[in-house]
Amino acid sequence: MAENFDQEKKNEVLFLQLIMTFETAAWQQMGKLKNPLTNKIEKDLEQARLSIDMLDMIKAKTEGSRTPNETKVLERILSQLKINFVEELEKERKQKAESEKKTEEKGEKKEQKSPNEKSKAQKSKDKKENN
């Protein structure tokens, strides 16, 4: 009986370790934690989405066999990751929109001529019309 209890505790610890492995990966992939191998912030939202999806799959596949503590930890982790993921997506969309706007503004400025250039062009046109 004690042996069975020890195995159950061991399995709970291993399950939580597995969950935390995907959690840490997702935080790193969202750019919220440094990658310990490169010591740099790296952002890859598609990989973060995959890590979160893996946790959702684990939740679905272990439904009915988790301890209350495992369920509580897993649900808390998923909730925090999903909220932060949505925030990161929104930041990325805003940055992309701002970047596109700046690119458009630069393009418009190039298309516009300075007042002196316009007057020169107008002078040339006027000269042709007068001749």
Image (spheres, rainbow, N blue to C red):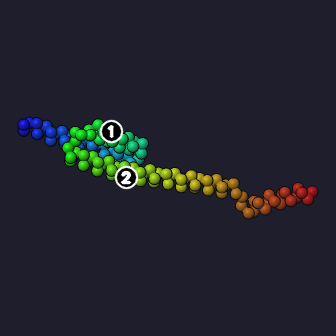
Q: Give the quarter of the figure containing the C terminus.
A: bottom right
Say which residue appears at 15% left-offset and 39% top-offset: 8
Which residue is identified by label 1? 57
Q: Residue pushed farthest right?
A: 131
Within-10-Å neighbours for mark 2: few <14, some 14–19, many 20+: few
Which residue is identified by label 2? 83
On the rendered structure, is 97 left or right of 86?
right
Q: Is residue 109 visible?
A: yes
Say which residue appears at 33% left-offset and 44% top-offset: 25
Label 1 residue SS: helix
Amino acid type at circle 2 is Ile
Q: Residue pushed farthest front?
A: 64
Say which residue appears at 81% left-offset and 59% top-offset: 122
Residue 35: x %, y % from top left: 34, 46
Residue 53: x %, y % from top left: 36, 41
Amino acid type at circle 1 is Met
* Disc with the residue nearer the chain's start (2 vs 1): 1
